[in-house]
Amino acid sequence: MRSNEAVRYPGLAWRLYSVWYRHMRVYTKNLASNGLPPFLEPLLFLAGVGLGLGRYITESMDGMSYLTFLGTGLLVTTAMFTASFECTYATFIRLEFDKVYDGMLAAPITVNNLIVGEILWAGTKGLFFSFAVLCILTPFGIVHFPQALSAPLVGFLTGVMFASMSLLVTSFVKTINHFNFYMTGFLSPMFFFSGVVFPIGNLPRPLQWMAEVVPLTHSVRLVRAACVGRYEVALLADLAYIAVFVAVFGTLAVRRLRGRLVS
């Protein structure tokens, strides 16, 4: 019996790739309409706030101009929002409305493979859109090649981190409208209080502690260091935070969604 299962199931890497490849094929069928919003939103914000408000901000922020400060932070916010939408609304639609997972689980993959493949796909989108925004920022001198080439890797880690958390949220949600609480009540405030728009050192002490707890702060710190080439030992703590966060939230998401998919 065990030998038959070994023949029937392909290797783990191939099973994860099959989930990733399925999502990639579906997403790229309408690449322009799917990719335009997450590509344009950070650029519009940069143009509106960075170019408009930035001219009145002459003070250096963490040793860089305000336009560089804001632009480098936006590299990971696009990864955060892209991965979060993918693993909330899109996952819920595949789960409850389109019943896509029922068909996928008829293939020789497990529920765990399916969920981990979802997380890797969301991480890939984070990498792709971080790189796309990076390519736009470079001609304007906001970031510089080749030192900023590692920034999309931070986008991948950010995508994986928020995909893990968003899948856990999805495991509890009963109706698609409940995602509004997560998006508006958690992600949007985190965007403003994680060091993207202004340094968190200017916040009151309780808000600084809160900023250190939420995940986006650590991604912002890493991507900004990657863009300006300012690496410090303290960044290892941010990497450790991301690793623990993904392990905890990813495990919880797998356990919760496994029960929901099987039932």
Image (cartoon, rainbow, N blue to C red):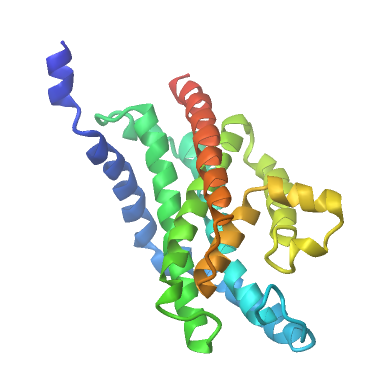
Location of residue 58 in the rendering, given as x and y in whole percent from the top left corner: 77, 86
Location of residue 156 in the rendering, given as x and y in whole percent from the top left corner: 45, 55
Q: Residue at x 82, y 52 (%)?
A: 207
Q: Residue at x 82, y 64 (%)?
A: 202
Residue at the outermost top position:
1
Q: Residue at x 57, y 42 (%)?
A: 166
- Can the viewer see residue 41? no
Above or below residue 158? Residue 213 is above
Residue at the outermost front position:
233
- Can the viewer see residue 108? yes
Above or below residue 170? Residue 146 is below
Residue nearest the observer in this picture, 211 or 123: 211
Location of residue 186 in the rendering, given as x and y in whole percent from the top left corner: 71, 48
Residue nearest the observer in this picture, 43 or 158: 158
Q: Residue at x 52, y 32 (%)?
A: 253
- Indicate the quadrant where residue 88 lies: top right
